[in-house]
């Protein structure tokens, strides 16, 4: 598998949600490829620790931006904080999820989730996309979620936001080809990250073994390099996503979320 080209997609890569899980692994793999990094998340201490580690190991430059992308102010902070940098790669990975009944969540919670999971991706894609189009090169990778496009009961708001992001990336993959920009959506399969237990999942109650974060990220970057509209990592998960009817998948996920999260 070829490494993603710093000359085409660099020299700086911006990664949101970089403090843990998939975002952290994007930082590790891109640093190994020589990319300078802008690390964005709410937990500044974790970002600094990661940045220092990767700087010492790979002799890269890094910048940390502490920002809450569930607010428009957080998005503006990222845009302003990168004003003087040549960002050729955007990994828009920030997101959250909390299983529960849609009607029991407060509207403020739902709106903040939409801002983080969807609107922040649109704003960053628009801002950096314009800069990349002017340069005639660059890459944008957005993160979605397996099953979102068909709807996930008890995560209705979250699946709606991820479905929007997936549709956005697929549309722009065609629309932006003439500009020289690659754009891909990572349709995230169940992956070994800190998010899994927050959704009520363990290695024992998943129907198939979750992917390693290394495999998830390496397949995503390969898809971006080849300018594929979407990437769903893991052959077994791709097969399952193809053959299992959406109605069956929704019914199954409803039972799983209810049971694993004690939803009455």
Image (cartoon, grey):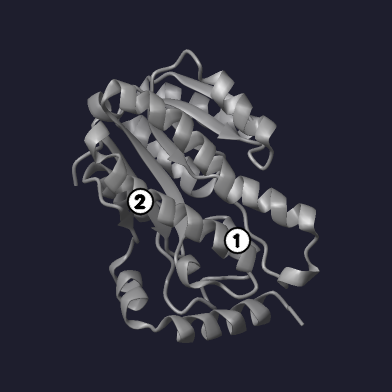
On the rendered image, what quadrant is the C terminus found in? bottom right
Report which quarter residue 157 is drawn in: bottom right
Report the residue marked by disc 2: 171
What whole-number distance in Å separates the C-alpha atoms at marks 2 and 1?
A: 20 Å
Most distant residue in the left direction: 2
Q: Tell me: 7 left or right of 160.
A: left
Q: Say if residue 17 shows up in the picture.
A: no
What percent of the width, then of the height, locates residue 55? Answer: 44, 22
Where residue 233 appears, x then y in whole percent?
A: 34, 60
Q: What residue is rendered at 46% in x and 67% in y?
A: 149
Q: Residues within 10 Å of mark 1 (few under 14, many from 20)?
A: many
Q: Nearer the viewer, residue 152 or 60?
A: 152
Q: Nearer the viewer, residue 241 or 28?
A: 241
Q: Nearer the viewer, mark 2 or mark 1?
A: 2
Q: Residue furthest top?
A: 84
Q: Label 1: which residue? A: 158
Q: Quadrant of residue 231?
A: bottom left
Task: Tell me residue 172's x, y (percent).
Answer: 35, 45
Element assignment for label 2: helix
Callout 2: few (<14), some (14-19), or many (20+) C-alpha neighbours within 10 Å?
A: some
> Along the horizontal axis of the image, is 111 left or right of 256?
right
Residue 259: give x, y in percent of width and height: 66, 82
- Secondary structure of the residue carrying numbered label 1: helix
Q: Residue at x 42, y 35 (%)?
A: 90
């Amino acid at each position: 598998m070829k490494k993603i080209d710093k000359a085409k997609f660099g020299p700086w890569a911006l990664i949101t949600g970089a403090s843990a899980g998939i975002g952290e692994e994007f930082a590790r793999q891109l640093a190994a490829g020589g990319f300078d990094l802008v690390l964005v998340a709410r937990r500044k201490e974790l970002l600094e620790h990661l940045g220092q580690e990767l700087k010492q190991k790979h002799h890269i430059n890094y910048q940390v931006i502490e920002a809450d992308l569930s607010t428009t102010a957080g998005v503006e902070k990222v845009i302003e904080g990168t004003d003087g940098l040549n960002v050729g790669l955007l990994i828009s990975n920030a997101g959250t999820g909390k299983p529960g009944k849609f009607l029991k969540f407060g509207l403020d919670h739902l709106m903040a989730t939409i801002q983080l999971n969807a609107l922040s991706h649109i704003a960053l894609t628009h801002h950096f996309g314009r800069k990349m189009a002017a340069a005639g090169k660059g890459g944008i990778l957005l993160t979605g979620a397996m099953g979102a496009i068909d709807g996930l009961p008890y995560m209705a708001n979250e699946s709606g936001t991820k479905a929007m992001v997936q549709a956005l990336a697929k549309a722009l993959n065609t629309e932006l080809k003439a500009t020289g920009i690659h754009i891909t959506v990572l349709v995230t399969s169940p992956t070994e990250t800190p998010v899994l237990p927050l959704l009520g999942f363990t290695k024992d109650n998943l129907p198939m073994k979750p992917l390693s974060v290394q495999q998830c990220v390496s397949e995503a970057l390969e898809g971006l390099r080849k300018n594929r509209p979407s990437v769903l990592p893991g052959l077994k998960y791709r097969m399952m996503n193809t053959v299992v009817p959406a109605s069956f998948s929704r019914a199954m996920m409803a039972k799983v979320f209810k049971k694993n999260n004690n939803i009455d």
